[in-house]
Image (cartoon, coloured by chain):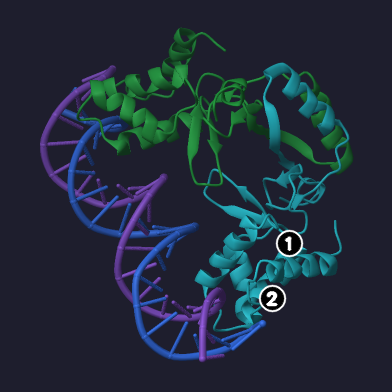
Chain colours: A cyan, B green, C purple, D blue
Amino acid sequence: MADPKDRYNSIIAKLRKNSYKITPQRMAIVEILANSQGHPSVEKIYDQLKKRYPTMSLTTVYRNVMMIKELGEVLELGFPDGSNRYDGNRPFPHPHVICVKCNKIIDPDLSNLRDLTEEVAQETDFEIITHRVDFFGICPTCRGGSG
Amino acid sequence: MADPKDRYNSIIAKLRKNSYKITPQRMAIVEILANSQGHPSVEKIYDQLKKRYPTMSLTTVYRNVMMIKELGEVLELGFPDGSNRYDGNRPFPHPHVICVKCNKIIDPDLSNLRDLTEEVAQETDFEIITHRVDFFGICPTCRGGSG
DNA sequence: TTTGCTGCAAATAGTTTGCAGAGAC
DNA sequence: GTCTCTGCAAACTATTTGCAGCAAA
């Protein structure tokens, strides 16, 4: 995972470059996105921020996450149950492994993914732009524990 | 792709086995899911059905698609924009290739996917249950055309 | 000072639920 | 005849928008 400090600085730089104003709310949201521990949802981000910024509104979180997403600095992960989760630490497409018990999301390094992408391109004659590769299973903790 | 007739019969058989009643609405929904041309959304299924069954309600489509999903006879594909699309022809997890211009979805055969799954399991020590593997790009038709 | 940002409340879209009548078995 | 299913309308959830006051640059 990238250094959250570096990611924070990159995102803030990008905001400045695009003439966005740097407000305390925005900084706080970027700080969480830069870290993206567990790939939080908008609601989770909001919950974390409310403690330190009691006047923070959910609307502001939505607006900023969406805006930063449009700048390409956060990756959005939508799920069929309607939940959207975000990764501002690695905003480029990458595979995920998701525990179906505790909903933890981790990012494996998969050397075979490049081969797979090439196989897709060859078989379908599509020009592949991006991908979404998620594996669902049970993590060692949930498997070993009492659950 | 599986023979839609076979899939239709399989799904209807599963419904009977689970003591669900076979209504005209249900049959019509199953017929579309068994074929799943283009991986339709609930709205698309509803639109197709309205022509032949003017009293068909969107609620009924939702209820039946969800119920058939819970029986494991349809695969749900959620996207970040909130759209959910369904595949009752191949209800097991399989990769998709999606054209970002015309939204066409096709199903490639990828021999390397098994290797990738094994790599994930080894690297993360997760017990992998299922996966979601989508590639996004531009199809030959959209690439060759005027777009 | 100017222009964009925030926070509230209302609007919106997609989906689910309650209920009464209809229909499968 | 019984019990589930359907269709309507209302409820609900997640997200977006309008607007007035506030704040970054």
Question: Eyeballing the image, is A57 above or below B77?
Answer: below
> Is label 1 in a helix, a strand or a loop?
loop
Q: CA distance from mark 2 to mark 1?
A: 14 Å
Q: Which one is nearer the viewer's eye here, A48 or A31?
A: A31
**Mark seen at residue A36:** 1
Residue linked to disc 2? A27
Quadrant location, the N terminus of chain B:
top right
Packing grade of label 1 (10 A; few <14, some 14-19, many >=20) is: many
Q: Is residue A123 above or below residue A25?
A: above
Q: Residue at x 63, y 76 (%)?
A: A21
Output the chain of dot 2: A
Residue A38: x and y in percent read 73, 58
Query: Which marked residue is nearer to the observer: mark 2 or mark 1?
Result: 2
Q: Does the residue at mark 2 contact the one at mark 1 (Cβ under 8 Å)? A: no
Q: Is residue A116 left or right of residue A81?
A: right
* Marked residue chain, label 1: A
Q: Amino acid at mark 1?
A: Ser
- The amino acid marked with disc number 2 is Met
Using the rendered view, name the quadrant where residue D4 is placed.
top left
Please give the label number shown on residue B83.
none
Q: In the rendered view, tell whether residue B13 sits above or below residue A69.
A: above
Q: Quadrant of the C terminus of chain B?
A: top right
Q: Residue at x 20, y 30 (%)?
A: B55
Residue at horizontal 51%, vertical 8%? B3
Same subunit, tags 2 and 1: yes
